[in-house]
Image (spheres, rainbow, N blue to C red):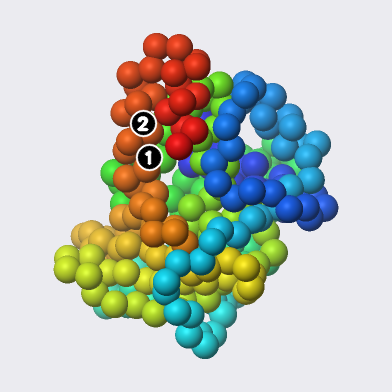
Amino acid sequence: MHDVAQWRSVAATLSHLPKATIGRHKMKPQFSLAALLAAVALGACHRAPAPANTATPSAAPPVSTAAASAPAPPAGGETPTAFVTRVLASYQPNGQQWANTGTEAADAAQQAWLQKYEAEVYDPDFLKLVNDNSQLAADKSGGMDLDYDPFCQCQGAGAIYSVVSAHADGARYDVVVKSDEKQQGPWTFVLTRSGAGWRVFDVLEQTGRSVRATLTQHNACLRAAKTETEGDKCVSN
């Protein structure tokens, strides 16, 4: 599995394991993807927050957990805040992102749900960057590039997410969100309007780093890499 669902498959496994502290930033892969997934199955790591940025969280209500399924087709006039609320609903505790897929049938159902979810929330070019990165990192560096899910800035279930603020930024819209983890700063969904409604164009991490720009840079480097050592250097920054 070399696409965006790989993060969530790993995270779903992690969410059923005991909590332990782990660094949030990219891990430096030193082993094959198969070995990585095996290690995840045996490990005991969980979500890990990043340093806070300068955004100031407001007292916003938590995102409802009632809609913890694939987003419905966007209604006319859906606000950016409502869209991000739907995006994060499945990341809430016991949300669909963390479904326990213990059988082939359950796994197939989860993969079908993820494909539908991704098609309804990602900007197509951003989704392609994510999927290309997973494939390139597996092929060229022997592991994963990002070891966390950019949407929740996490590696597993447990946190409660809420919207902090939203404002227009030129042709796009920025929606700042936070979790209930005190040591985790807020991060930002950058939205773009498509014919079908709002889509996630980028995610700005707690430090302000653009996930889209990072993946673009890493993918170009990985494509040019001739050896696994070169590929490893591409994802180590």
Where does residue 230 sit, x and y in percent of width and height?
44, 18
Q: Is residue 137 left or right of residue 92?
A: left
Residue 229 is labelled as: none
- Badge 1 is on which residue? 215
* Image position of 105 with respect to 170: above or below: above
Pointer 2 local density, CA inside 10 Å: few below 14, some 14–19, many at least 20: many
Q: Amino acid at mark 2?
A: Asn
In front of the other: 102 or 22: 22
User: What residue is drawn where x is 74% and y is 32%?
Assistant: 39
Question: Relative to the observer, which residue lies in front, 210 or 91?
Answer: 210
85 and 146: which one is in front?
146
Task: Decide if residue 100 is on the left or right side of residue 179.
Answer: right
User: Where is mark 2, residue-wise?
Assistant: 219
The CA distance from mark 1 to mark 2 is 6 Å
Which residue: 35% across, 26% down? 221
Q: Is any part of residue 6 visible from this angle?
A: yes
Q: Helix or strand or loop: what does disc 2 sit on?
A: helix
Between 192 and 57, the one lying in front of the other is: 57
166 up-or-down from 222: above or below? below
User: Residue 184: horizontal and vertical position, in percent?
Assistant: 58, 66
Q: Position of residue 197 (x, y in %)?
A: 28, 65
Quadrant in which the C terminus is drawn: top left
Seen at 46% across and 26% down, the residue is 233
Q: Name the image quarter holding the N terminus.
A: top right
- Residue 38: give x, y in percent of width and height: 73, 29
Q: Are discs 1 and 2 less than 8 Å apart at CB?
A: yes
